[in-house]
């Protein structure tokens, strides 16, 4: 860590969150059964470069089961270039700006806030440079 944790980067937090989302989704595992395998749909559509699963009801019903990245681009090179060549860091910068502009933090319960302030005050007395 840079400077032993004395500095931080908001964009890195956003990227780390994206990686965490991916790991959580992976750890959920996959349901493998007749419905998720969709053998009937595969047989109906058939093999080949002209095969199109996007129009199939099964695809529409299950489209949200796959993890969808917010920062990482899954497009091919040409599509990525046409879209402006934004890197994951570029998207993280945009996301940080969006969060800073729109986020409304939830207020702590007053009792919890009071307790946190007491903890900080005690730590300041113990660890603050004199």
Image (tube, rainbow, N blue to C red):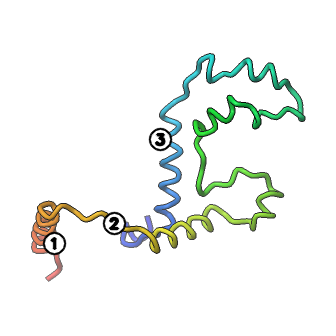
Mark 1 = which residue? Answer: 127
Mark 3 or mark 2: which comes first in sequence?
3
Disc nearest the viewer among 2 and 1:
2
Q: Is residue 21 left or right of residue 46?
A: left
Secondary structure of the residue carrying tag 1 is helix
The residue at 77%/23% (across/down) is 42
Q: Earlier in the sequence, mark 2 or mark 1?
A: 2
Residue neighbourhood size for the residue with mark 1, other residues' Cα within 10 Å, grouped as few (<14), some (14–19), many (≥20) = few
Judge left or right: residue 108 versus residue 35: left
Comparing 44 with 96, the one in front is 44
Q: Nearer the viewer, residue 39 or 78?
A: 39
Mark 3 is surrounded, within 10 Å at the Cα level, by few (under 14), some (14 to 19) or many (20 or more) other residues, namely few
Q: Which mark is residue 105?
A: 2
Q: Which residue is mark 3?
A: 24
Residue nearer the viewer, 4 or 90? 90
- What mark, if any, has residue 62 been given in the picture? none
């Amino acid at each position: 860590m840079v400077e032993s944790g004395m500095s931080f980067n908001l964009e890195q937090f956003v990227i780390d969150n994206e990686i965490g989302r991916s790991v959580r989704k992976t750890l959920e595992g996959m349901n493998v059964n007749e419905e998720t395998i969709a053998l009937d749909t595969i047989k109906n559509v058939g093999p080949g470069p002209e095969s199109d699963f996007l129009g199939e009801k099964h695809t529409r019903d299950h489209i949200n089961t796959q993890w969808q990245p917010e920062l990482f681009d899954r497009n091919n090179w040409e599509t990525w270039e046409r879209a402006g060549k934004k890197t994951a860091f570029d998207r993280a910068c945009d996301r940080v700006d969006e969060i800073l502009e729109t986020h409304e933090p939830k207020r702590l319960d007053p009792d919890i806030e009071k307790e946190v302030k007491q903890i900080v005050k005690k730590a300041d007395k113990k660890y603050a440079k004199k």
